[in-house]
Image (spheres, rainbow, N blue to C red):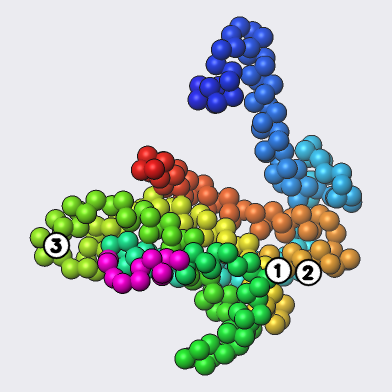
Amino acid sequence: MRQLDTALGLGAIRGPLGRIVKVALYALVVFVFAGPLLALLVSAFGRVTDPTKLTLIPHDLTLDNFRTAFDQGVLRYLANSLVVVGGGLLLQIAVSVTAAYALARKQFPGVRIVLFLILSTMMLPEEILAIPLSLVLADVPVLHVNLIGSLAGMIVPVGAWAFAILVMTEFMRDVPIELEEAARIDGAGDLRIFWSVILPVCRPALGVLGIFGFTMIWDQYILPLLVAQDAKQFTLALALRSLRADEQVGTGVLIASALLALLPSVVVFLALQRQFMRGLTSGAIKG
């Protein structure tokens, strides 16, 4: 609380008037940031007829919105999203840590060119990559398999994310070389050093990648739109658009579905917030 007072410039305000000002400002901050979430939560359990008149005061509470959402197949879409984000995040972390270990701890010709090529992929918007990506997924090189119409087609493209690779590379570069040298003296090989020395030190960075990677995959819209050929393959983000276009689905059902789409991101952040804050603090100290 004292840190918040200092950040807002309220540390010098004393007396009853100062306390009133602080409480009012704190209430305003909570209302601005938490108000929309509370309105979403209350409306999901209420009867909403006008989407422009959401309220923070609960009344006429009901579970009908969720029942209708379940009848519309929202649980199936939620399960698809969890499968995609679970498989995609595991693949993304595996690719990121192995690529970062090679880029950060090994010296080989062209390492700067490789980093530049990885960075360049972040400069292209998804709309430009949509057509080439759909062609590649329709006939994967070397394997010659068609991933269109399968959840695997939504998992494989998110396995390599430039942001995750660059973050892990910079974090691994700051791991003291003495730790690696001591492990080599004890007879450890590259795989043992990577698994037992480098990865435990990079645990805060893994927390950061877990949160950002989960959010990136969970919010994917264009990729499922390209891959899914049937409503049974929709993810929740794609299904929300379909529910919104359905005139027979009420606003309350759409809000209840949106709440279900929001909850996993909140749960993941709460579960990884300690590692996330440690990762941010480590980066600030090293910078």
Q: Amino acid at mark 1?
A: Leu
Q: Which residues are magenta?
A: 106-116
At numbered mark 3, what does the secondary structure look like: helix, strand or loop? helix
Instruction: Say which amino acid is labelled 3.
Output: Arg
Q: In screen coordinates, is 71 left or right of 118?
A: right
Q: In the picture provided, is 63 more to the left or to the right than 235?
A: right
In front of the other: label 2 or label 3? 3
Q: Nearer the viewer, residue 244 or 156?
A: 156
Residue 188, compared with residue 144, is above or below; it is above
Residue receiving disc 2: 242
Q: In the orientation shown, which residue stands out farthest toward the top?
A: 15
**Spot occupied by residue 37 in the image (x, y as percentages of width and height):** 70, 44
Instruction: Tell me if mark 2 has few (under 14), some (14-19) or many (20+) residues whose alpha carbon lies within 10 angstroms of its own.
Output: some
What residue is drawn where x is 38% and y is 59%?
169
Of the two numbered discs 3 and 1 in the rendering, the one whose residue sits closer to the viewer: 3
Label number found at residue 184:
3
Label located before the other in sequence (2 or 3):
3
Q: Nearer the viewer, residue 52 or 114?
A: 114
Q: Amino acid at mark 2?
A: Ser
